[in-house]
Structure formats: structure tokens, C-alpha cells
Amino acid sequence: MKNLIIRYAASVAKPGQQFLVLFGAPGVGKGTFAKLLIKDTKFNHISTGDEIRKILKGNTSQSFDQKLIVTIKDIVAKGGLVSDEIVMNILQEKLKEPESAKGVILDGFPRTLRQLDLYEKILPTNVVVNVTLRADILLEKLAARRTCVGCGTAFNICDINRDGYVMEPLNPKKEGICDACGGKLVVRDDDKKEVIEQRMKEYEEKTHPLLDRYRAMGVVIDFEVKKGKKDYPRLWDLVKQKLRV
């Protein structure tokens, strides 16, 4: 831990820089809300999950040994979490981007108490949005997610309208084809049933306990998703009370 702190000490926050952490189970909608928050905050979005997928495709400026890439791919395929060092490397590089100067939206980090211990020593937390969704609906949405093999754009073929939850599908214009680049839409390896179950187990055991720490810091906003993107105005009203925007 001490060596990691020394190595990443250069990543300390710049004056005026703000940090928003999107917290919640896999597939709850963190990425969707992040894209909307970017427009209003003008913050940089750092999704460790997206960056790891870029590494696996070789679409990154960072250099990784091929053997390590194979290891990462195996971990992701099984629904596990990659090492703290890899995650911190990703974070450090993204923090160097000019877009991070005003603020950062963190999506998928920190995921373990050890990562939070490290993060707290070098970066502040202004607000944590705890995004929640009823478990059965969350699992249904995860199983219905379709992702472009080319550009990574995500769609969802699930249509939910029950018990006060109204979430329209995010269908592509042409079945199985990405609207953005024309690539093929597939079910990601980590969206398959057995992997989803493992990801949820990892979340409950390693990530969910972080909430207690965040609550003690007084920075948590609890936000239950009921109508997908249509919930965003309600979320923004809560977030802007906590940030300087």
C-alpha cells in the first residue's frame, strides 16, 4: 500500500478540481447517468470498466504486457476484479487529460476498501451518488444489454412497465446493428448469466461495504432508478446542490 501511495502521489487533486463518484451494482445505469452528468458538469468521465475493455482490445495509449492482458481477460470473463495497480494506472493516466482539470466523474472506482484507502490519501470526494435499482429488474436489464463490438455503444432490448418501474427499451434502429458505427451487437461475456451472478457477488462482498465509509463522510446521495433516463432531472437537482457548477 505504501509503495502505491508514493507512486501515485502525483495524482493529487488540483486546486478547484471536484470529484463525483457514481456508486452502484453492475448494470444499474451508472454509465448512462455519467454521460448526462458530463453535459451539465463539463467534468471528465473515467470509467475503469470501459478503460479495461479498451486494454483488452488494444485500443489504449498505455502499454501492457500480452501475458497481463490475457490475465485481465480471464478475470473479466469470470466476473472478477482486476488488480489495484492496474486500476490506479488507468486513473493516473486519465487524470492527466485536460478534460479532468475542472472535475472528474468516477464510474467503477473505487471498488474495494483497499482502493478507497488509497484513493482517500491522494484525492478528495465531493459527492457519491449511490444508484440503486430493484434486484430482479436489474438482473433482467443486464441480461438484455447488447453492446457493439466496434465502438462499445450499449443498447438494451428490455421493456419494463410494472410496480412503478417504467423503462423503455433502448433498441437499435436495425436489429443487431449499432446505430453509431454499424458494428455487430453482442452480449458481452460479463453480461452472461453465470458471470452476472459472480459480478453481483463481488459487488456485495467487496464494493457495497464502501457505502458505510462514504456515509460517515456525509457525501452520499441515495438515488433509486424508476424510469431510466427520465429520472435524470431529479438526479441533477440533487447533485448540483453538492457541487460548484
Image (tube, helix red, strand yellow):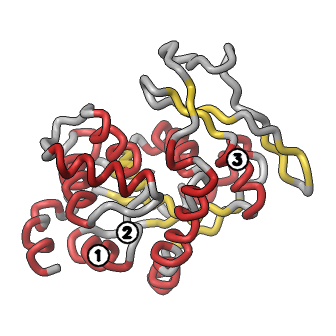
Report, in whole angstroms, how far the alpha carbon at label 2 lies from the one at label 1: 8 Å
- Mark 2 and 1 residues: CB-CB less than 8 Å, in contact? yes
The answer to whether any part of residue 94 appears in the image is: yes
Q: Which one is closest to the eye, mark 3 or mark 1? A: 3
- Give the class, few, some or many, for how many residues have Cα within 10 Å of label 3's Cα (few <14, many ≥20): many
Q: Relative to residue 1, is residue 88 depicted above or below? A: above
Q: Residue at position x 58%, y 65% from top?
A: 200
Amino acid type at image mark 2: Thr
Q: Residue at position x 9%, y 75% from top?
A: 3
Q: Secondary structure at mark 3?
A: helix
Q: Secondary structure at mark 1?
A: helix
Amino acid type at image mark 3: Lys
- Mark 2 and 3 residues: CB-CB less than 8 Å, in contact? no
Q: Which one is closest to the eye, mark 2 or mark 3? A: 3
Q: Quadrant of the N terminus?
A: bottom left
Which of disc 1 and disc 3 is earlier in sequence?
Answer: 1
Foreground: 69 or 108? 69
Q: Relative to residue 75, is residue 34 depicted above or below? A: above
According to the image, label 1 marks what residue? 120
Residue 85: image quadrant is bottom left
According to the image, label 2 marks what residue? 125
Q: Relative to residue 121, is residue 137 depicted above or below? A: above
- Residue 84: x %, y % from top left: 26, 66
Foreground: 93 or 37? 93
Amino acid type at image mark 1: Glu
Q: Relative to residue 183, is residue 109 depicted above or below? A: below
Report, in whole angstroms, how far the alpha carbon at label 2 lies from the one at label 3: 29 Å
According to the image, label 3 marks what residue? 141
Q: Secondary structure at mark 2?
A: loop
- Residue 201: x %, y % from top left: 56, 71
Q: Is residue 169 left or right of residue 74?
A: right
Foreground: 128 or 159? 159
